[in-house]
Amino acid sequence: MHIKINDTVEVVAGDDRGARGKVLLVDRAAGKVTVEGVNRVYKHVHRSQKNPQGGRLSKEMPVRLSNILLVCEACNRATRTGTRYQDDGSKHRYCKKCGADNGQIAPRKALYAKK
Ligand SMILES: [Zn+2]
């Protein structure tokens, strides 16, 4: 998975196309992420102890990973990502447009370290 919590991503398909937001939650099993301000729905809630007023609650629902792209930290564009190993064996992702490093996505592995 090349998307992490707190990444900035851009929506490239669907109703919220063009919107940018911070990743709040990643569901690896379902291949979905929840993005701040994207795919907001109204959940109608009944009166309860926790919610004495009841009413409508606005919340974000998860979107498919294929509908979002990472926003590159260096060039500020929505981009596909590649991965490459650093000399110490850790796996990093990089921007396919400008080539800039966009952070580590897997821990160091001796197998991939440069001797
Ligand atoms: Zn870039």
Image (cartoon, helix red, strand yellow):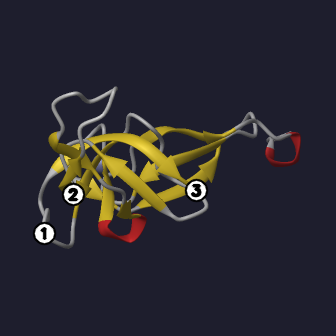
> Eyeballing the image, is 67 above or below 112?
below
Q: Residue at x 22, y 27 (%)?
A: 52
Q: CA distance from mark 2 to mark 1?
A: 8 Å
Q: Residues within 10 Å of mark 3 (few under 14, many from 20)?
A: few
The image position of residue 35, as x and y in percent, is 30, 47
Q: Residue at x 80, y 41 (%)?
A: 113
Residue 75 in view, yes or no: no
Q: Residues within 10 Å of mark 2 (few under 14, many from 20)?
A: some
Question: What kind of element bears circle 1?
Answer: loop
- Between 70 and 87, the one lying in front of the other is 70
The kind of residue tagged 1 is: Asp
Q: CA distance from mark 1 to mark 3?
A: 23 Å
Residue type (three-letter) at the residue carrying disc 3 = Arg
**Which disc is residue 28 wearing?**
3
Q: Which residue is mark 1?
A: 15
Q: Quadrant of the N terminus?
A: bottom right
x 24%, y 46%: residue: 45
Going from N to C along the chain, the mark reached first, 2 or 1, is 1
91 left or right, relative to 43: right
User: Looking at the image, is 72 positioned above or below residue 10?
Assistant: above
Mark 2: is the Cβ under 8 angstroms from ligand 1?
Answer: no
Quarter of the image for residue 114 reads top right
Quarter in which the C terminus is drawn:
top right
Q: Which residue is mark 2?
A: 39
Which callout, 2 or 3, points to the residue nearer the camera? 2
Q: Earlier in the sequence, mark 2 or mark 3?
A: 3
Are the residues tagged 2 and 1 within 8 Å (C-beta)? yes
